[in-house]
Image (tube, helix red, strand yellow):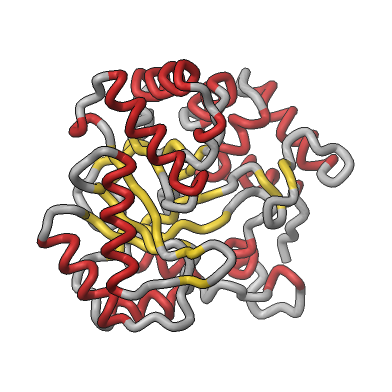
């Protein structure tokens, strides 16, 4: 498994993170087998959020770790907080601190390796976030921090008060959903792809040594569906994926994985599957090094242009 450091830290992580959003639907025996498989293959970074399964995902994961006798130092745990579903986003000091206490209880652990603020809070007060982070770091409950779905200036606003490095930014990224790449390539044009929807977050992340964690790497739109195998909407892309899969003796899923990991930003991909066979394909993709020409061919096949 390809390894890399997380952001500006010395924490070494796999290029593939195991997304735990759907594990609440797994039976205990199935979950135990899946976690054992992941660890056997070097997948020891697990991404959670307090809202996944209304907390059940974290609880079931903690129970599985205990059943399997997994040592805490052998896994890297990341979770997210800040969303109060259907009501608001909350980055207040009280909410962040309480959320972490609840997360730790559900995961049955004493600390998180990484805490991520889930979505930007319009009412954020950086000083409150800084106080919360200091409390959590000084108590040993959180070792590293990051954000999710944030624009560069929102990050800069937090950094005005927060002293801890913000190591990661979780952002949606896939072959069809890659405006953060398109707006750079279509600079100074009046095309759809030239629209900068995220403040040049890709370049910002590279400049500031933040790791982009790509979520929904096989989806198009906002949870509209999977593009792999969708011949109706993405015929050219699927043809290219199939051709390259045959060349590398792999699968379209592996090639779509390789496309994300080929980018020099050293993106960490969050794989939210609970299917062991699919994860094997993703693992295979992490070992494929696409050529520059192949990377651009996939990019154009997904509907983007080269000016």
In terms of image quadrants, where is residue 67? top left
Closest to the observer, 165 or 100:
100
Question: Residue at 66% of width from left, 80% of height from top?
Answer: 188
Locate residue 24 relative to residue 138 in the image: left or right.
right
Give coordinates of residue 64: x percent, y percent.
36, 25
Seen in the picture, residue 272 relative to 94 is either above or below; the reply is: above
Closest to the observer, 202 or 19:
19
Q: How many marks?
A: 0
Closest to the observer, 7 or 194:
7
Give coordinates of residue 197: x percent, y percent.
61, 73
Locate residue 123 relative to residue 196 in the image: left or right.
left
Closest to the observer, 174 or 146:
146
Seen in the picture, residue 183 relative to 299 is either above or below; the reply is: below
Quadrant where the C terminus sits is bottom right
Give coordinates of residue 203: x percent, y percent.
45, 67
Question: Residue at 61% of width from left, 33% of height from top?
Answer: 255
Give coordinates of residue 38: x percent, y percent.
40, 24
Question: Residue at 66% of width from left, 23% of height from top?
Answer: 247
Question: Residue at 33% of width from left, 36% of height from top?
Answer: 3
């Amino acid at each position: 498994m390809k390894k890399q450091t997380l952001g500006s830290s010395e924490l070494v992580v796999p290029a593939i993170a195991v997304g735990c959003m759907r594990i609440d639907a797994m039976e205990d025996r199935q979950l135990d087998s899946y976690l054992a498989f992941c660890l056997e293959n070097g997948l020891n970074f697990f991404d959670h959020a307090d809202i996944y399964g209304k907390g059940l995902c974290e609880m079931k994961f903690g129970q599985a770790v205990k059943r399997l006798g997994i040592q805490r130092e052998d896994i890297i745990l990341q979770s997210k907080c800040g969303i109060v579903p259907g009501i608001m986003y909350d980055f207040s000091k009280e909410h962040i601190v309480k959320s972490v206490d609840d997360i730790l209880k559900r995961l049955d652990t004493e600390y998180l390796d990484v805490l991520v603020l889930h979505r930007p809070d319009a009412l954020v007060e950086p000083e409150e976030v800084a106080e919360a982070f200091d409390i959590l770091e000084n108590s040993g409950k959180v070792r590293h921090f990051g954000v999710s779905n944030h624009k560069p200036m929102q990050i800069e606003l937090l950094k005005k008060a927060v002293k801890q490095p913000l190591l990661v930014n979780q952002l949606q990224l896939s072959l069809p959903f890659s405006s953060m790449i398109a707006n750079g390539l279509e600079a100074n044009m009046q095309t759809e792809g030239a629209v900068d929807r995220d403040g040049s977050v890709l370049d910002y992340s590279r400049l500031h040594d933040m790791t982009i964690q790509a979520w929904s790497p096989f989806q198009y739109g906002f949870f509209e569906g999977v593009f792999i195998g969708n011949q109706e909407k993405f015929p050219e892309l699927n043809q290219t994926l199939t051709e390259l899969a045959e060349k590398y003796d792999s699968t379209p899923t592996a090639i779509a994985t390789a496309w994300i990991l080929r980018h020099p930003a050293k993106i960490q991909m969050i794989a939210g599957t609970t299917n062991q066979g699919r994860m094997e394909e993703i693992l295979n993709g992490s070992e494929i090094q696409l050529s520059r020409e192949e990377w651009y061919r996939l990019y154009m096949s997904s509907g983007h242009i080269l000016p």
